[in-house]
Image: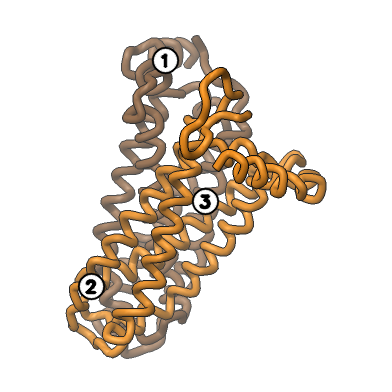
Chain colours: A orange, B brown
Amino acid sequence: MEAFQVWLVRTLGGAYGVVSPFTNSAWGWPACETLHFLGLSLLVGTIGMFDLRLLGMAKRVPIVALHRLVPWGILGYGINVITGALFLMTEPREYIYNPAFHFKMLFMALAGFNVLAFYLTTFRKVKVLGSGDDAPRVAKVMASASILLWISVLVCGRLLTFYRPGLCGAERAGFLSTCIP
Amino acid sequence: MNSLFVWLESSSFSVWVRESNSVFAFPAILSLHTIGMGLVAGLNAAIDLRILGFAPRVPLMEMKRFFPLVWIAFWVNAASGVVLLIGYPTKALTNPVFYSKLLFIALGLAVLLLLKRHVFRDPRLDENPVPRMGRMLAVASLACWTGAITAGRLLAYTYVRLLSI
C-alpha cells in the first residue's frame, strides 16, 4: 500500500501549483475550514433529522416529505468534498500518512455503502409510509448506522491534528504507512 | 484579568485539558463540541429551511419534536465550551472574535425562543402560510448560526496571545 500512498501524494500534489495561491493565501485556508464546518452542519442536521424520523422521532412527519431536505445534506456533502480536496491537494502528506485520515475515509466509504444499501433495498417501502407510520426494521438499522458513521467521520476529522505523521525512522509501515517516507 | 488567566492556566484541570496525551482530554472535548455544533446549527437550519418553504409537506408543528435535541446539544456545547475555555482562557478572552461568537450564539438562541413563542405556539400553524415574521426569524436564525460557526472557526487563526503562563 505504501507505493499507492506515494502515488496518491504525487498525484494530489500535482495540483499544488493550481490550488496553493488560494489555499495558502492569508484567508484561503480559514475560509475553506469555515465552509467545511458549515457543510458538515448542513449534512448532520438534515440527514440526521431524516435518520431520527426513521428511528421513530417526530412520527407524524411523513418520511417522503422530510426526504425533500436530503438535497441540502448532499449540498453540505458537496461543499465538504470540494474543500476537503483543496486541503488534500495543498498538504497531501499530512493526510495520506495520517491514521485519523485513514479511518475517516473508511467511515466515509461505509457511510456511502449504507446510503447505497438504503436506496437499493428499503427505500421503496419507506417511500409509501405516511404520517404516524413506523419504518421497517432494516431502515432503522441503516438509520442508526448512518448516525454512528457520520459521528465517527466527524471525530476522525477532529483527530487529524492530533495524529500528524512524522518522517519515517527505522521502523517500516504495516498495511498503511503512518509516517512520511 | 492577567492574574485570573495565570491562576486558571496553572490549575491542574486546565493543564490536563491542554497537555494530557489522553484522547479523552482535548481531542474528545473538541469532538463533542463539533458534534454538538453540527446538531445545534444543523437541526436549526433544517427547521429554518422548512419555515422558508422547503419540504412543504412536512407538518411544521411536528418539527417542534426536534427542539429538545437542539437544547441537549446546546448544553453539551456550553459545557464542552467552558472546559475548552478553562484550558485556554487567555487565547479566547483576549480575542475580540470570541466575543462575537458568544454574541452570535446569544442572538441565535434569542431567535429560537422567538420562533417558539411566535410561530410554534399557533395551533393552526399548518393551516396557513408561515407569517412574514416567522420567515424573517428563520433567515435571522440561519445568519446567526453561520456567524457563530464562522467566528468559532476563525478563533484558531486570529488569537493574539495563547497563554499567560
Q: Which residue bears the numbered disc 1?
A: B9
Q: Point out residue B120 in the picture as x, y percentages from the top left corner.
A: 30, 73
In the displayed structure, does residue A181 sit left or right of residue B145?
A: right
State the residue at coordinates (74%, 40%). Answer: A24
The reply to whether label 3 and label 2 mark residues of one chain is: yes
Q: Quadrant of residue A180?
A: top right
Task: Return the residue nearer the eye: A33 or B69.
Answer: A33
Using the image, determine if residue A50 lies above or below residue A4. below
Q: Which mark is residue A138?
A: 2
Using the image, determine if residue A52 lies above or below residue B165. below
State the residue at coordinates (38%, 24%). Answer: B86
Q: Residues within 10 Å of mark 3 (few under 14, many from 20)?
A: many
State the residue at coordinates (58%, 24%). Answer: A168
Q: Point out residue B67 in the picture as x, y percentages from the top left corner.
A: 28, 62
Q: Point out residue A68 in the picture as x, y percentages from the top left corner.
A: 42, 80
Query: Circle 2 — which element?
Result: helix
Query: Circle 1 — which element?
Result: helix
Q: Which residue bears the numbered disc 3?
A: A37
The CA distance from mark 3 to mark 2 is 30 Å
> In the image, which is nearer the foreground, mark 1 or mark 2?
2
Q: Quadrant of residue A46?
A: bottom left
Q: Point out residue B19 in the picture as x, y percentages from the top left corner.
A: 41, 18
Mark 3 / mark 2, whichever is N-terminal: 3
